[in-house]
């Protein structure tokens, strides 16, 4: 027996499981080819503070992940976290939507044990691949006592990010991920160093439990531009329970789209005013009179993650004060 932490490493596909024809293929390669055992074979095990158990849950690019994938990952992770001999989880995941899965887990898991998502921008077959080091660092973070109670984390490019804040902000660079207020910490020589805690409520302090959610409501995102036709808003409003309107600048709404969005709200669709800029705060009753129009304001969350939060909030509440409070609390 050892005093190492017991970490389960789950494979789901992505570039971290990808393979190119040649080492020079850093951006053109097949995703989701290698199994989790193959990926784990590329890292040095002896120096890790962890006993590893591998599990292949999915094998697909994260661009394919719908609500059913989120629920499947959440339910499996939740079950594993209940096992006494599991100290933490690492999920190898495609980078495209890693922030959405991470935020979903951050808001729904009921455990203080570390859950760490990790991806790579270059497949293991490429020159200067980041896959092995990112995975090694993620396991070190999951095994570290300082990660307990931090919520779901994303480890990539030497950085430890909170799931709430992290976004993919480059399509190809190794330093593809950023958090608007900076990472929580760094990993150097396999040793995590923390400098901050997540300020917003997560995991044990949220009302959502993944075991009690069988399906998620339809929430869609509208990306704003001046030539956007009202018919598109009407079509989405006819099928969705919530709409995230990724407006220009500070959540602005073109004059010809105000009435379609007001009509959607009158018909009971929960309209959230967000921003397509990728960062910053959308202030309630700032650029638009949300109280008058029956709309919600996103605070500082990006549209893709606002969608996750609204879906969860709608599983328990329909009144706007509760829904608005969710955007200010989580
Ligand atoms: C994916 O998200 O599955 C593909 C891209 C990547 O992992 O970087």
Image (tube, grey):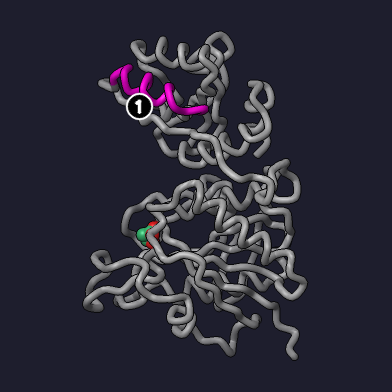
Q: Is residue 252 magenta?
A: no
Relative to 52, is 281 above or below?
Answer: above
Between 220 and 125, the one nearer to me in the picture: 220
Can you see residue 199? no
Q: Is residue 123 left or right of residue 75?
A: left
Residue at position x 61%, y 52% in the image: 105
Residue at position x 43%, y 22% in the image: 237
- Disc 1: which residue: 224
Can you see residue 187? yes
Residue at the outermost front position: 214
Which portion, as a residue range, is magenta? 229-242
Q: Is residue 230 magenta?
A: yes
| Quadrant in which ligand 1 is drawn | bottom left
* Dot 1 alpha-carbon crowd within 10 angstroms: few under 14, some 14 to 19, many 20 or more: many
Residue 185, given in percent of the width and then of the height, sits at 60, 61
Q: Quadrant of residue 146?
A: bottom right
Between 74 and 168, the one nearer to me in the picture: 74
Q: Judging from the image, what secondary structure is the residue with disc 1 in?
A: loop
Where is the C terminus found, in terms of image quarters?
A: top right
């Amino acid at each position: 027996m050892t005093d190492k932490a017991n970490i389960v490493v789950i494979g789901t596909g992505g570039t971290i499981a990808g393979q190119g024809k040649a080492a020079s293929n850093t951006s053109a390669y097949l995703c989701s080819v290698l199994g989790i055992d193959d990926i784990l074979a590329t890292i040095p095990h002896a120096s890790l503070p962890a006993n590893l158990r591998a599990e292949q849950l999915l094998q697909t690019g994260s661009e394919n992940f719908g609500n059913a994938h989120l629920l499947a990952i959440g339910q499996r992770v939740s079950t594993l976290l209940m096992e006494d001999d599991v100290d933490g989880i690492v999920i190898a995941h495609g980078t495209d939507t890693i922030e959405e899965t991470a935020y979903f887990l951050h808001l729904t898991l009921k455990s203080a044990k570390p859950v760490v998502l990790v991806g790579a921008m270059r497949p293991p077959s490429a020159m200067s691949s980041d896959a092995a080091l990112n995975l090694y660092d993620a396991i070190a973070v999951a095994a570290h006592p300082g990660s307990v109670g931090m919520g779901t984390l994303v480890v990539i490019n030497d950085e430890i990010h909170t799931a709430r804040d992290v976004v993919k902000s480059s399509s190809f660079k190794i330093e593809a991920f950023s958090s608007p207020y900076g990472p929580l910490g760094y990993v150097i020589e396999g040793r995590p160093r923390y400098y901050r805690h997540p300020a917003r409520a997560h995991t044990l302090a949220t009302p959502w439990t993944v075991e009690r959610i069988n399906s998620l409501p339809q929430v869609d995102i509208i990306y704003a531009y001046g030539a956007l036709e009202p018919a598109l808003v009407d079509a989405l409003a006819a099928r969705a329970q919530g709409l995230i309107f990724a407006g220009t600048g500070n959540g602005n709404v073109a004059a010809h789209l105000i009435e379609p969005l007001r009509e959607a709200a009158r018909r009971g669709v929960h309209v959230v005013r967000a921003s397509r800029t990728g960062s910053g705060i959308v202030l309630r009753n700032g650029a638009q009179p949300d109280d008058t129009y029956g709309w919600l304001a996103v605070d500082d969350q990006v549209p893709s993650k606002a969608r996750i939060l609204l879906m969860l909030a709608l599983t328990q509440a329909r009144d706007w004060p509760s829904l608005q409070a969710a955007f200010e609390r989580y």
